[in-house]
Image (cartoon, rainbow, N blue to C red):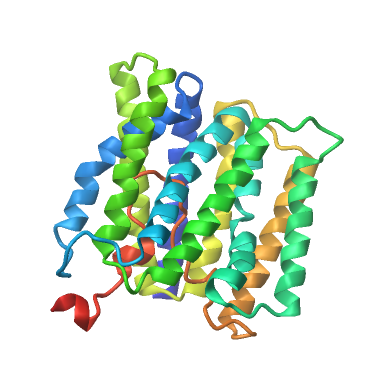
């Protein structure tokens, strides 16, 4: 089953990468606010199908309102920043920076989850951050908003992932899924009014593809994590760098330079070390990276960990 799970994960991340290629194409004509708004709007019917199957009882009042609010804000920021980065930077460079999220999760898990991080994982984080510097090359190249946006997206993904690890067992799945989607549509509807562009039928199809591909890829990830071990499924996310190179060259005339590939390699190696360290025990009790089962930058798509979560006895009552 691990082999099948790995293949499903590879397929899911290929679909995610196609999703990002469409986002980059749309980014040439529309602001990230408009892309996030429409893709979130198209996601409503898909998410509703998941919510109506929620077996838990209760109301929509969060148990931890401030944590839910902060996580919802992160889920609004992450795709907006990532989509802006896709529209301004080469795909491979954006992925390399987004791959720093597991490193940031490891750091944030210390104050938020009380995680004990050993020397080896801390060294891996530092090495990975050096990889980020290799990618952005401060001083050698001019940094622009795309670089900052990609790192902001990675930081938002990391923070929301750690928050859901902290409160996920106490909050209803419907609360964790519905609030971010509603807030995203509300905020983006206001933000895009300042940069609205007319939308044609082909553009609407593009927005729909972003929503559907994000949803389908996430469902495949749910099955992959159900069938296989997280330590084998999680590293498959790094296959996106291959698709970034292929799509970048075929559709956008992008050829990744040596520093981008070298920095991406360093970041990936650091992330793989952290995953392996958590899988084998080490000093990790929460295993925050292994249990982060969502890419985090597809607006409106359900979160893998929430879809897989089984209701507790108190939730069933």
Which residue appears at 65% of the width and 48% of the height?
A: 96
Which residue appears at 32% of the width and 73% of the height?
A: 170
x and y percentages locating residue 63 in the rendered image? 31, 67
* Residue 4 in sight here: no
x and y percentages locating residue 314 in the rendered image? 20, 80
The answer to whether residue 87 is above or below residue 261 is above
* Residue 162 in sight here: yes
Q: Is residue 266 left or right of residue 198?
A: right
Q: Is residue 17 left or right of residue 172?
A: right
The residue at the far top in this view is: 198
x and y percentages locating residue 207 in the rendered image? 34, 31
In-front residue for pair 65/114: 65
The answer to whether residue 41 is above or below residue 119 is above
The residue at the far right in this view is: 139
Q: Is residue 186 left or right of residue 80?
A: left
The answer to whether residue 30 is above or below residue 263 is above
In-front residue for pair 152/224: 152
x and y percentages locating residue 67 in the rendered image? 42, 61
In-front residue for pair 155/140: 155
Which residue appears at 39% of the width and 69% of the height?
A: 167
Q: Quadrant of the C terminus?
A: bottom left
Q: How many numbered circles are shown?
A: 0
Q: Is residue 170 left or right of residue 67?
A: left
Q: Quadrant of the N terminus?
A: bottom left
The residue at the far front in this view is: 66
Which residue appears at 67% of the width and 37% of the height?
A: 147
Snapshot quadrant of residue 112: bottom right
């Amino acid at each position: 089953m691990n082999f099948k799970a790995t293949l499903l994960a590879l397929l899911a991340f290929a679909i995610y990468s196609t999703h990002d290629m469409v986002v980059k194409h749309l980014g040439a004509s529309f602001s990230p606010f408009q892309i996030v708004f429409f893709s979130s709007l198209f996601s409503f019917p898909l998410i509703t199908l998941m919510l109506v199957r929620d077996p838990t009882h209760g109301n929509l009042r969060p148990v931890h309102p401030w944590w839910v609010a902060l996580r919802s804000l992160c889920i609004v920021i992450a795709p907006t920043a990532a989509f802006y980065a896709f529209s301004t930077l080469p795909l491979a460079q954006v992925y390399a920076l987004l791959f720093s999220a597991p490193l940031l999760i490891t750091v944030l898990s210390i104050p938020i989850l009380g995680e004990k991080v050993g020397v080896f994982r801390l060294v891996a984080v530092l090495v990975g951050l050096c990889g980020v510097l290799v990618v952005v090359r401060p001083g050698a190249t001019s940094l622009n908003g795309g670089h900052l946006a990609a790192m902001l997206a990675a930081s938002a993904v990391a923070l929301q992932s750690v928050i859901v690890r902290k409160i996920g067992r106490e909050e209803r799945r419907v609360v964790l899924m519905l609030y971010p989607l509603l807030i995203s549509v509300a905020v983006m509807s206001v933000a895009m009014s300042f940069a609205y562009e007319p939308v044609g039928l082909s553009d609407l199809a593009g927005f729909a593809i972003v929503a559907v591909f994000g949803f389908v890829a996430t469902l495949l990830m749910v099955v992959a994590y159900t069938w296989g071990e997280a330590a084998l499924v999680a590293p498959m996310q790094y296959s996106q760098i291959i698709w970034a190179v292929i799509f970048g060259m075929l559709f956008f005339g992008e050829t990744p330079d040596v520093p981008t590939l070298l920095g991406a390699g360093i970041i990936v190696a650091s992330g793989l070390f952290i995953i392996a360290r958590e899988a084998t025990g080490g000093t990790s009790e929460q295993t925050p990276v292994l249990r982060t089962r969502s890419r985090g930058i597809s607006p409106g798509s359900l979160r893998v960990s929430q879809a897989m979560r089984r209701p507790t006895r108190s939730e069933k009552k």
